[in-house]
Amino acid sequence: MALPYSQSALGMRSSEIRRIMKLAGDPSLISFAGGSPGTSLLPAEIVDGLYGGMSTQAKQVAMQYGATDGFPPLLAEIKKYLGSKNISLEGQELIVTTGAQQAINLVAKVFLDPGDVVVTEYPSFIGALAAFKSYGAETVGVAMDDGGIIIEDLLEMLDKMGKKAKILYLTPYFHNPAGIIYSAGRKRKLLDALGGRDIILLEDDPYGELYFDAADKELTAPMKAMPNHAVQICYAGSFAKIFSPGMRLGWLCAASEIIDKCQLAKQSMDACSPTFTQALAAERLSKGKMPAHVETLRAAYKRRAETMLKSLKEHMPSGVGWTTPKGGFYIWVTLPNRMDASEVFQKAFDGGAAFVVGCAFAPAGKKNDCLRLAFSNTPEEKIGLGIEIVANAVKAFIR
Ligand SMILES: Cc1ncc(COP(=O)(O)O)c(C=O)c1O
């Protein structure tokens, strides 16, 4: 019998994410594929202590269903955190989500009809592209430079498009996959340019806390916190990269009216995010221990990034370019002479290393002369060898 799939299921493509996660978990490979935090950096012992320290009653509350908008003590802690980032909650509300992925999905669900247009950076986060496409939206990409999305190109695209774009999706802080961070000037100019254009800005910020040097902290100030603009900003965050992705916790802060709709949408998805992990996260935050852990992460990821950059310099042939991240998990590599990243991938894979090919991050089209290297979950001592394997694969295609 032909199974009666929905149009949306029929439109789903074999997920690059599934392939990446599989590769990321293969112990025989040196994998720069998954965008996962370092496994050895996950604070397992801290979680033991948090749970052990809870009363029986608190544990039972944690094991119950919870409110759709989130576990109140966690909501209170996230509000405090947003306050520390100068995000005003006037006219705004907050919802805890099952990862930032669900925050993106909720925004897509409440705003998108089939055929609507979402503008993203080029390249852009695969999970967001998949979410937009699952509602039948068309995704179009705008190029970036080192300071963020190119505003002139964005405005030209918005002006010449036959339809009005509903959402602009951006990852301004330690971009996945490009590794860059927006300059302060670009953010201001962007908000000024978007004012009055009637487009929702979805500002996705799961990596902002992971700057390598304290001097760069101010670059991570969200657009959501900027004064004097007329842009409707939905701001998404996550505990995945600073605590644990397995907890599946993120949040969305947006106008109260939007959060109301998101609550309705979430009720039919999962009713509430796991109370269990929300309770643990709330405990952790209320004890004020998060900053010290994040500081450890910054130092560890900085060392991994530096090791990878050094190895790239040592092994890559001339003509290959790459970004130099100031934080986050990723380096974006541009291959010479329109080389095909899929061919390089196969060669590297045969040699024992993996990465993600650039076309996986393309909002539309199949340009494939770039690749993403994640340094986050590879021990420093393996990074050099892995990069040497990738570089040898690149050299094999230099004509
Ligand atoms: C840019 C971006 N947004 C959202 C997510 C999803 O995060 P979460 O694990 O909180 O769902 C990721 C995960 O890699 C990401 O890179």
Image: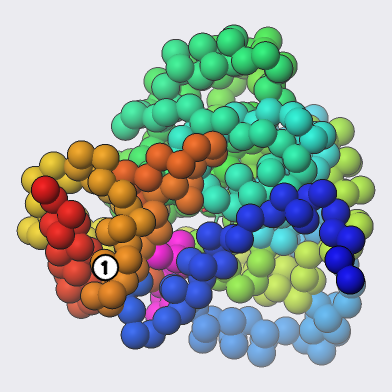
Query: Where is 184 relative to 246, above or below?
Result: above
Q: Quadrant of the N terminus?
A: bottom right
Q: In the image, residue 40 lies at what x, y percent?
A: 40, 80
* Residue 391 appearing in the image: no
Who's the residue at 61% across and 73% down the image? 246
* Residue 21 appearing in the image: yes
Q: In the image, residue 395 lies at what x, y percent?
A: 13, 57
Query: Where is 162 relative to 224, above or below?
Result: above
Query: Where is 311 relative to 264, above or below?
Result: below
Q: Residues within 10 Å of mark 1 (few under 14, many from 20)?
A: many
Who's the residue at 46% across and 35% down the image? 122
Q: Residue 261: which quarter of the image?
A: top right
Q: Is residue 249 left or right of residue 243?
A: right
Who's the residue at 71% across and 17% down the image? 163
Kind of element beneath mark 1: helix
Q: Residue 37: which quarter of the image?
A: bottom left
Say what amino acid the circle numbered 1 marks.
Ala
Residue furthest to the front: 1
Q: Which residue is mark 1?
A: 348
Q: In the image, residue 297 lies at what x, y percent?
A: 38, 65
Q: Is residue 282 left or right of residue 346?
A: right
Decide whether residue 130 is among the magenta residues: no
The answer as to whether callout 1 falls within 8 Å of ligand 1 is no
Q: What span is in magenta?
A: 33-41
Q: Main secondary structure of the magenta part?
A: loop
Quadrant of picture, ligand 1: bottom right
